[in-house]
Image (spheres, rainbow, N blue to C red):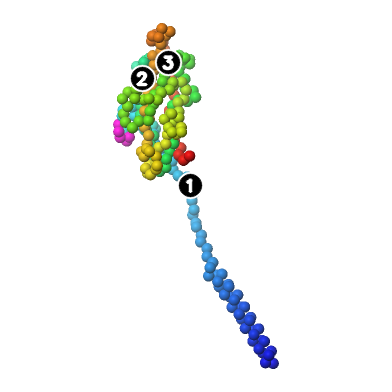
């Protein structure tokens, strides 16, 4: 009987130990468990803001320049008694592209479009000396068209970034000025002018244009910006 009592006590003790272990394990699991919920998460695109201004009279303060969406009219307008004569040039127009974002932007400037042609009396005008466009990136007033060293025949769209930029891009720094670019200004200014060269005859003399209808070209100036991607 003593032996049986001892066995019972041992069995009870073992069961108690097992129960304690189960309870301890359960408690341990509870002690090291937790959960966190993050609510109201939002993903949205950042704002993109590029401002375009222009002037034909240099002013160091861009605030005084014309807004491209304002009422100042076309950048170039030479009609009537202001029309170009052979040998004339337009005024130099300064175009400022201002990056209002905190990141760098690639500026794209195209003058003209796929329909850009010279016309006379409604017909395409073929000339040995068609209009030329002159342009440069500038930081100050340009003293005449001779100060613009880049030029092309204006008989098709001209993409200025292809010649003025690096690897076909004109990069404008972000508005916060915190970048690695050489130019830490958040804008770029491009000066543009047009020339109607003298057309020469077979004797290399100015061709007589008296009594001829005006030679015209109507064109668009497309300016856009895209976020710069480091290559």
Mark 1 lies on a secondary structure that is loop
x, y percent for residue 66: 35, 31
Q: Residues within 10 Å of mark 3 (few under 14, many from 20)?
A: some
x, y percent for residue 186: 37, 39
Any mark on residue 44, and which?
A: 1
x, y percent for residue 197: 39, 16
- The residue that disc 2 covers is 89
Q: Nearer the viewer, mark 3 or mark 1?
A: 3
Q: Are marks 3 and 1 in contact (CB under 8 Å)?
A: no
Residue at the spot 46% in from the left edge and 20% down from the top edge: 155
Q: Are marks 3 and 2 in contact (CB under 8 Å)?
A: no
> Going from the N terminus, do you reach mark 3 or mark 1 first?
1
Residue 220 falls inside the magenta stretch: no
Q: CA distance from mark 3 to mark 1?
A: 52 Å
Mark 3 lies on a secondary structure that is loop
- Within the image, what quadrant is residue 192 found in? top left
- The residue that disc 3 covers is 129
């Amino acid at each position: 009987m003593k032996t049986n009592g001892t066995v019972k006590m041992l069995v009870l003790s073992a069961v108690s130990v097992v129960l304690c272990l189960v309870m301890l394990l359960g408690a341990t699991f509870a002690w090291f468990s937790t959960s966190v919920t993050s609510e109201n998460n939002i993903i949205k695109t950042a704002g993109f803001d590029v401002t375009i201004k222009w002037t034909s009279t240099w002013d160091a303060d861009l605030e005084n320049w014309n807004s491209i969406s304002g009422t100042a009219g076309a950048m170039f307008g030479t009609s009537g008694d202001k029309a170009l004569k052979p040998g004339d040039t337009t005024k130099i127009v300064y175009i400022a592209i201002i990056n209002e974002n905190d990141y760098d932007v690639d500026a794209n400037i195209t003058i003209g479009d796929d329909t850009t042609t010279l016309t006379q009396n409604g017909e395409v005008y073929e000339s040995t000396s068609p209009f030329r466009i002159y342009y440069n990136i500038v930081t100050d007033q340009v003293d005449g068209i001779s100060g613009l060293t880049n030029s092309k025949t204006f008989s098709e769209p001209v993409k200025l970034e292809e010649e003025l930029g690096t690897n076909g891009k004109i990069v404008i720094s972000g508005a916060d000025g915190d970048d690695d670019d050489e130019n830490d200004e958040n804008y770029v200014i491009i000066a543009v002018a047009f020339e109607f060269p003298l057309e020469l005859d077979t004797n290399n003399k100015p061709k007589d244009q008296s009594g001829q209808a005006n030679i015209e070209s109507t064109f668009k100036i497309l300016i856009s910006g895209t976020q710069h991607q480091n290559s």
